[in-house]
Image (cartoon, rainbow, N blue to C red):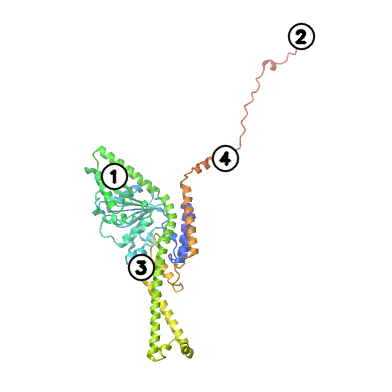
Amino acid sequence: MSQFLKNRLARLENHLKAENPALLEVLPTYYQFDKVLHRTGLLSKETSLASQISWWPLISVLGTFSSGKSTFINSYVGDKLQSTGNQAVDDKFTVICHRSSDTSGNQTLPGTALDADPRFPFFRISHEIEKVAQGEGKHIESYLQLRTAATDQVKNKIIIDSPGFDADDQRNATLRITDHIIDLSDLVLVFFDARHPEPGAMQDTLEHLVARTVGRTDASKFIYVLNQIDTAAREDNPEEIFGAWQRSIAQAGLTAGQFYTIYNEASSIPIEDQALRERFQSKRDHDLEKIIARMDEVELQRNYRIVSVLETVANELDHDILPELRNAKAKWRRGVLIGDGIALALLIAAVVGGAVYFKWMPPMEIFSLEWIMAHKIDSIVAVVGALILAFTFHFWMRGVVAKRIAATLSEAYGHVELNVRAAFLKSAGAFHSIFRKEPAGWGGRAMKNLRQIRETVATHIQNLNDLYADPSGRAAVVAETAKAITDVSKPIEPTPAAPIDEPKPDVATDAKPDTKTEA
């Protein structure tokens, strides 16, 4: 592990100690999983699973151009951070976070602030952009910017505002960043414009943000919002706009989900009819309350998301990656054996043909013991030479077949982008037998470690449940019992006695005695 990675993980631990101690106990499980993935070659030894995810609560706001994303964010944050308008006003991904107490006023920082800081979810994103769009990685300023705000709404969370999806053809780099933030986000708000709900205007969004989310295991984190619905008040049947929007989404494959309609009061059109205005306001307030509630719960969702990443990666490893590696290694083994067989056949044919051609010996005596004993030195030299040639050809064939198969494997598979290609090449290395069916680094010990990780993940989930849920009501009972024990254990203070009344002076008693005696 490099010193840079050690420092990064140390900063992460310090951050969790101060911000969320409940997640601190999860880090050792990440480190345990690192060892399994390092042995298989799926994860570089200079990388940790803990560095592949965002430990901050993350909300991303995606959708079409001019669908009111920035207006919504400004309203939620309580500050005018983002420019708004009817046309596309920002073509960058804007990361919004709480500003430092040492600075005054909102600030806009360049994309380098995100690309070079491991605390943010875009750390080294320029390298990923370079993979899908050569030469674009150095233009990180064209894709990202960081804005800070002093409002409490953005404390301990990050909000990402995205460029729209319905202008020109999307650049590969933009789509790569979009996929990246979707994978990392705890909540994804997908905005559509009620003024243009028809499928034509929504095509790019439907294809990339809806159709691709249908089969995701974390599809529940997506919320679909038809914004600026106040414009529908001019229609004879405003419900038809909402229905057309839902039908368009259903055609993209999404038949169930969370759908809301909202608008911004400050930028809405006047609705003259009072009854209609109250109906629109009531619907908007109800849906907006639901959306804000989900946004406020994002810290809780983050805790479960970070724990569930371990289970997700374990499932990907068990169900997808290992079978793919076994299949790739089987293809490699067949290719190498076929090549070795062909080489052996050619070698035998060459020896026999040479013997006959140069009249070294009669063809029928080529393998006779008498001839071999008579030509011991020549035989040994021939055997050694043949073995050297065979082994040289064998290892050459191993490399050729391995490269051909590796080209079909992914370098970034799954939730944390594991390198399946590197894992296969490690399995096809010079010191790994072609007859071993399991990939390099995988065996009984690795399976045992994976089982232990799954069991530990279940324990982490239970611990989180204990923090946020109490189905049996035991916590309340324990609290009441503790209170009762505390009350009983308190020392009993004596009841103060009633004050004793002093006798009032008696006049007859207090009178001076009569010293006179009767005569």
- Badge 1 marks a residue whose secondary structure is loop
For the residue pair 336 and 486, the one nearer the viewer reads as 336
Q: Earlier in the sequence, mark 1 or mark 2?
A: 1
Q: Position of residue 266 (x, y in %)?
A: 29, 44
Determine the residue located farthest toward the front in the rendered image. Answer: 364
Looking at the rendered image, the disc whose residue lies closer to the viewer, 1 or 2, is: 1
Name the amino acid type tagged 3.
Answer: Thr
Query: 498 left or right of 125?
Result: right
State the CA–CA distance, disc 2 to disc 4: 77 Å
Q: Are marks 2 and 4 in contact (CB under 8 Å)?
A: no
Compared with residue 196, is residue 382 higher up or lower down, i.e. above or below? Answer: below
* Circle on res. 408: 3
Amino acid type for the residue under numbered disc 1: Ala
Three-letter amino acid code at the position of disc 2: Glu
Q: Secondary structure at mark 3?
A: loop
Q: How many labels were placed on the picture?
A: 4
Instruction: Identify which amino acid the numbered label 4 is placed on.
Output: Ile
Q: Residues within 10 Å of mark 2 (few under 14, many from 20)?
A: few
Q: Earlier in the sequence, mark 4 or mark 3?
A: 3
Q: Nearer the viewer, mark 1 or mark 4?
A: 4
Q: Nearer the viewer, residue 455 or 185?
A: 455
